[in-house]
Image (cartoon, rainbow, N blue to C red):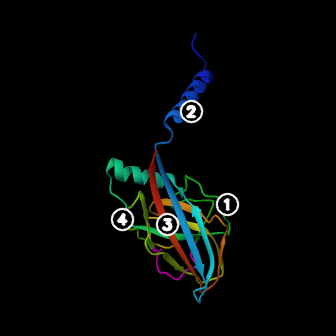
Amino acid sequence: MLPSLDNIVRQFRSMGRRRQRLYGPNLRLREHLYARVLDPTGRVKSDDYGHNLITNAGLNDVLNAYIRGTTQTTAWYMSLVDNSGFSAFAAADVASSHAGWSENQSYSQATRPQWSPGAASSQSITNSSSVNFSITATVTIRGIFIISNSTIGGTTGTLFSEAAFSGGNQSCNNGDTLQATYTLSLASN
C-alpha cells in the first residue's frame, strides 16, 4: 500500500526542518537604513533606523547578475514612502505594482537621488555620504525604497528593497532635509 499524500508531505517537511537544524541558513542578505531629519537651520529633528525587506525582484536581480551572468544593474536610486494610505510592504512588490504603499514626491530634486555605495568592506557596502531629500511640503514619511529607475514616480525598473522606519513615521516640513544612509550586508554561516 502506498503512503498517503498527507504522510509524504509531513515526512518531507520534517526532513526540511531536520536539515535546517543541521546546516542552518547558509547565506543572509541584510539591509539597514539610517535616516535623519534636519530643520532649515540644520538642527536635528529626529534620527531613526530600519531594516529593509529585499523584494523578490531584488533577490532575482542579484541571482541573475552574479550567478547567471546577466547584465548587472549599475545604478540604484532612493526615494520616499508616503505614510498616507500605507498598509504594508510585500516581497512580491514590483516597480509597477505595490498596492500597500505609494511614493512621496514632495522633494525638490529633479530625479530620485542616486545611492552611490563605496567599495565593499567586511562584507558590507554603504554610501559614504548621505542621500539627501530637500522636503517641499508638510509630509509624513513612512520609509524609503531602492529602485533602478531615477524618474520620480517612475514605474519601470527593478524595485530592490523597501523599508519602514523602526521608530515610527518621520514628520517633515517644507524646508527640512531628510538624510538617508543605506547599508547592505552579506553573511555566511
Pick the residue in front: 71 or 168. 168
Question: Secondary structure beneath disc 3?
Answer: strand
Question: Secondary structure beneath disc 4?
Answer: loop
Asked whether 178 falls inside the magenta stretch, the response is no
- Tell me the crowding category of disc 2: few under 14, some 14 to 19, or many 20 or more residues within 10 angstroms, Cα based: few
* Labels 2 and 1: the sequence-earlier one: 2
What amino acid is at disc 4? Ala
Question: Secondary structure beneath disc 1?
Answer: loop
Stretch of the chain drawn in magenta: 104-113
- Which mark's residue is nearer the viewer, 4 or 1? 4
What residue is shown with label 1? 87
* Labels 3 and 4: the sequence-earlier one: 4
What amino acid is at disc 1? Ser
Q: Which numbered disc covers residue 17?
A: 2
What amino acid is at disc 3? Tyr
- Cα–Cα gap, marks 1 and 3: 23 Å
* Labels 2 and 4: the sequence-earlier one: 2
What amino acid is at disc 2? Arg
What residue is shown with label 3? 182
The quarter of the rendered structure image containing the N terminus is top right
Callout 1–callout 3 Cβ contact below 8 Å: no
- Which mark's residue is nearer the viewer, 2 or 1? 2
Location of residue 103 in the rendering, given as x and y in whole percent from the top left corner: 57, 69
Residue closest to the far top: 1
Q: Main secondary structure of the magenta part?
A: loop
* Labels 4 and 1: the sequence-earlier one: 1
Callout 4–callout 1 Cβ contact below 8 Å: no
What residue is shown with label 4? 119
Location of residue 33 in the rendering, given as x and y in whole percent from the top left corner: 54, 65
Question: Secondary structure beneath disc 2?
Answer: helix
* Labels 1 and 3: the sequence-earlier one: 1
